[in-house]
Structures are given as C-alpha cells and as structure tokens.
Amino acid sequence: MALPEITTRAEWLRARTELLAREKEATRARDALNADRRRLPMVEVTEPYRFTGPDGEVGLADLFAGRDQLVVQHVMFGPDWDAPCPSCSGALAELSDGLLAHLAHRGTTYVAVSRAPYERIAAVAAERGYRFPWVSSAGSTFNHDFHVTLDASVAPVLWNYRDADELRAAGQGWVVEQAAEGPAEQPGYSCFLAAQGRVFHTYSTFARGTEQLGGAYAFLDMTALGRQEEWEQPAGRVEHARGAVPDFGPEG
C-alpha cells in the first residue's frame, strides 16, 4: 500500500495550510456555481404526469406535499426488475428521517421515483426499512421526458445533456448501445418549484453530478484512503481497489 509520507507536525501544518488556501478557493467557486444554479431559468411542466403511491394515483403537484419545492431522485428500478440498482440503493440507504425533516423545514419535499410497479416498490421499501416517499411512474412518460429512461425507439437519446453523437465522442457510446436495446435506466435528480399555482422544472443532474449531495463519499473524500476506488490518485492506497461504482455492498 502506498501510504502518505510520514513527516513532522510542523511540516504537516505547512502542507495543510497550503491545501487550506486551495480548499477556500474551491468553496468560493462552489458558492458562485450554486448562485448561478439558482439563476437558471425554469420551464413550466404542463404534462399531466400520474404517479402511484400509498394513497393511490396522484399528480406531480401532489408530490410537493404542500411545500414550495420538490427534489425527485430518479431511482433505477425497471418494471421487470426484482430490486433497484445497487448504486441507487447505496444513496437510498443513507437517507435519514433527520435529513427529510430538515428539507421539510425549508419548504422542500424529497420523493424517490421509479418505473417499477408500486407494489414492488412498497415491498422493497418494507423489506429494507425505507421510510421516505417512493412512488411509481409506471404508465407515464415522466422518466423518458426527464432522460433517465433511455429508449431509442421512443425518443432520440439524450443523457447528461449530450446527444448520441456527443456521447460517442466522449467515450460513452455504451449509453447509446443500451438505449438501442432499450429501455435503459439511468440515475439522476430533478428539482421542481411550485409557484403561482403552476409547477416548474428548475434543475436536473446526472452521472457524477449526483455526488454533490454528499453522503458517504463526502466523508471518505476527507480521509487518507479516500473512496478506495481504482480511478483515484494517488494510486495504490488500498490493496484491493473497488471499481468506480457508487455502491457500498461487498466487493463483487
């Protein structure tokens, strides 16, 4: 294992102070980025999407639960799957009652949405002890319209704001191939705002953009061994590095 260099407390403090300056730059850059995110224009959602949950069929506006904002986690759980994907499951496992309460206190509701039938969603939630809202979008075009269910037979492929040609050029042709075999599920988050009696889409993020929510990765990024995944630098920090898959189950 290639562990950090051993040094004196004085040398560590010097190096740490230099890194602190860069961390402050990153914090200021993140603040500016967040401000620009809030300045994004918004688009009214007029499609009458329907979802199935514990109280039966509801609309998108109902998912707000009377609050001003809605954060949707697009959970990869297809209609014929037995369980949601391990990566999405890792994020779901980190949701807490406290987090949901804090969001609610700031007028924001969290809801997970999947294409699996609600009966299967409810069974998985009960088995795993999940207590957050989780509804089914089965029968609607919600997942397709927000580009987390990719199916070339339904609509041109667009994922993480790249079309098929751009995805191939970026080395992500596998997304296009999956969509050609379709439908292919992808993870993401979408944000909505209720205002003036209307619902607006304000933001969506995919791929590594979902990491900005923190969770276990935010803690691991502070440590000497990091995420312990094979792409990280410096290399060799752990004997058996994991693949770049954001799940937290046993290797393999």
Image (tube, rainbow, N blue to C red):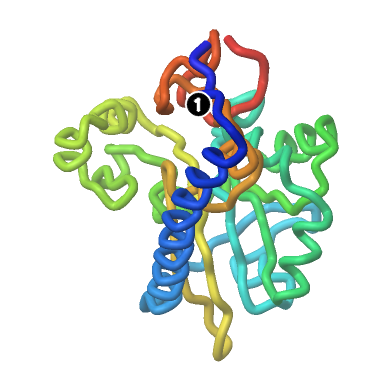
Residue occupying the point 52% across, 39% down: 11
| In this picture, residue 242 sits left or right of residue 183 | right
**Vertical placement of residue 144 versus 177, above or below:** below
How many numbered discs, if any?
1
Looking at this view, is 20 or 231 the one in front?
20
**Vertical placement of residue 234 versus 195, above or below:** above
Residue occupying the point 79% across, 49% down: 96
In percent of width and height, residue 105 lies at 77, 74
Q: How many residues crowd mark 1 within 10 Å: few (<14), some (14–19), many (20+)?
A: few
Tell me which amino acid carries mark 1.
Val
Looking at this view, is 149 or 226 the one in front?
226
| In this picture, residue 160 sits left or right of residue 103 | left
Looking at this view, is 54 or 107 the one in front?
107
In percent of width and height, residue 64 lies at 67, 70
Q: What SS does tag 1 mark?
A: loop
Residue occupying the point 68% across, 50% down: 135
> Hey, which quadrant is residue 116 in on the image?
top right
**Vertical placement of residue 224 versus 149, above or below:** above
Residue at the extreme bottom: 196
Residue occupying the point 28% across, 38% down: 152
> Hey, which quadrant is residue 34 in on the image?
bottom left
Which residue is denoted by mark 1 in the rendering?
245
| In this picture, residue 108 sits left or right of residue 232 | right
In percent of width and height, residue 78 lies at 55, 33
In percent of width and height, residue 231 lies at 40, 24
Q: Is residue 46 visible?
A: no
Which image quarter holds the C terminus? top right
> Hey, which quadrant is residue 130 in on the image?
top right
Q: Is residue 5 visible?
A: yes
